[in-house]
Amino acid sequence: MEERIRIGILMGGQSLEREVSMASGCHLLENLDRTRYEVYPIEIGVDGKWYHHHTIEPLVEASATIPPEFRPLDSYEAPSPVYSELVTARVMRSRVDLMLPALHGPGGEDGSIQGFLQTLQIPYAGSGILASSLTMDKARCKFFIRAAGLPTPDWVFFSRRDWEKGAGEILEKIQAKLPTGGFVKPNDQGSSIGISRFGEGADPSEAICKALRYAEEVLVEKALGGRELTCGVYGKERPEALPVTEIRTNSDFFDYFSKYQAGGAEEITPAEISEDLTQKIQSLAIRTHRVFGCAGITRTDFILDGEEPSIIEINTIPGMTRMSLIPRACAAAGLAFDAILDRVIGETLFRDEVVPMV
């Protein structure tokens, strides 16, 4: 047999999204072509240690379903030594040709693991340090989006210190800038963790206190009330857009439960929108991907402002679980998910140069 490329899949981590990360990593495990790749499942524990799983069946079985609510990190149990081996990143450097991060949230999607791998000179797929850190920071991402001339809803941004010193002044600013209501979000969390919605004239103080349980900074974003759409993009040199998906949720918004539980939301791919709007959203998704210098696979989320799409955020490591939007969009486009992974891996290992952003 021809020598296979050795791929380490990084999953788990120390964020509240570790359950989603484990499910994403296991779905990647199931989809990588074993005739081309020798796969190394690596779980980063809540204890910060790296565990190389030699047997994937217990790992896949444990990650087959995602709990309806994220679990507290203090409930973590380390993998059994029966089927896993405690390793270091330096050891894995000698065993793999490339790392494929499937880590979500702080420590995995914010540039931290990318910087660590880069320091150890371990090639990794996906976006780099700057793109990852900018896009994980919701408010600074929006500053960057608007500076690039791209549409995004209005917002108010402040820190815990700001809130403690002048809550009344911040509430007045929110009311003046977002009179029709909005979403209160922890600034550096994913999977809708800690997000609340408030209506016109409502006091968002309780929602702000909730968000501050998960982050030191808070973003309060204008609620536009239009249809919610999302679009994946893959590739670095010549990024391509996947079909647009419309999300119709049974909750007030696309929350953690809606994202990961069967029946939590209806996801329609391709979205039932005009061809012109489809092309506009795909073009904006590609432009956003390029503006931040992203690589691998991203997903840009939109809300319609009337008939015009407005960018909510871009995700540099979107969910890759069986229920996630990217694998479903690939299927709707008639694209094999493993072929998309082949391209992402190939661009990381075999490109000679990075083509400048156009």
Image: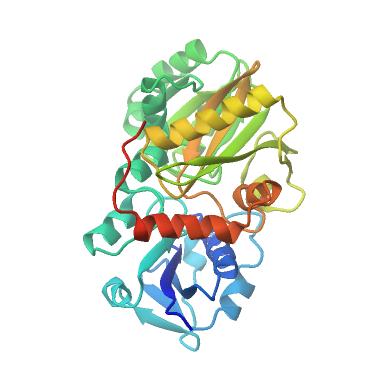
When the figure is inspected, residue 46 is found, relative to residue 150, above or below; the finding is: below
Locate residue 161 relative to residue 188 in the image: left or right: left
Residue 173 horizontal/vertical position (percent)? 44, 14
Q: In this view, does 256 lie above or below 120?
A: above
Is 74 or 145 nearer to us in this picture?
A: 145
In percent of width and height, residue 194 lies at 53, 42
In the image, farthest residue toward the top:
176
Going by the picture, which residue comes out furthest to the left? 119
Q: Residue at x 27, y 54 (%)?
A: 115
| Image coloring type | rainbow
Q: Quadrant of the C terminus?
A: top left
Q: Is residue 264 visible?
A: yes
Q: How many labels does the image show?
A: 0
Residue at 36% in and 73% down? 96
Please give the name of the residue rendered at 71% of the width and 34% of the height, measured from the top-left corner: 271
Give the residue drawn at x 37%, y 66%: 98
**Res 169 quadrant in image:** top left
Left or right: where does residue 325 sit relative to residue 209? right
Residue positioned most to the bottom? 82
Task: Tell which of 181 and 240 is nearer to you.
Answer: 240
Q: Up-down: is 14 above or below 286? A: below
Looking at this view, is 14 or 146 the one in front? 146
Depth check, front residue: 218 or 192:
192
Residue 30, horizontal then vertical, whole percent: 60, 69
Q: Position of residue 205 (x, y in %)?
A: 51, 27
The answer to which image quadrant residue 193 occupies is top right
Residue 44 visible in rendering? no
Q: In this view, does 311 lie above or below 231?
A: above
Residue 40 appears left or right of 202: left
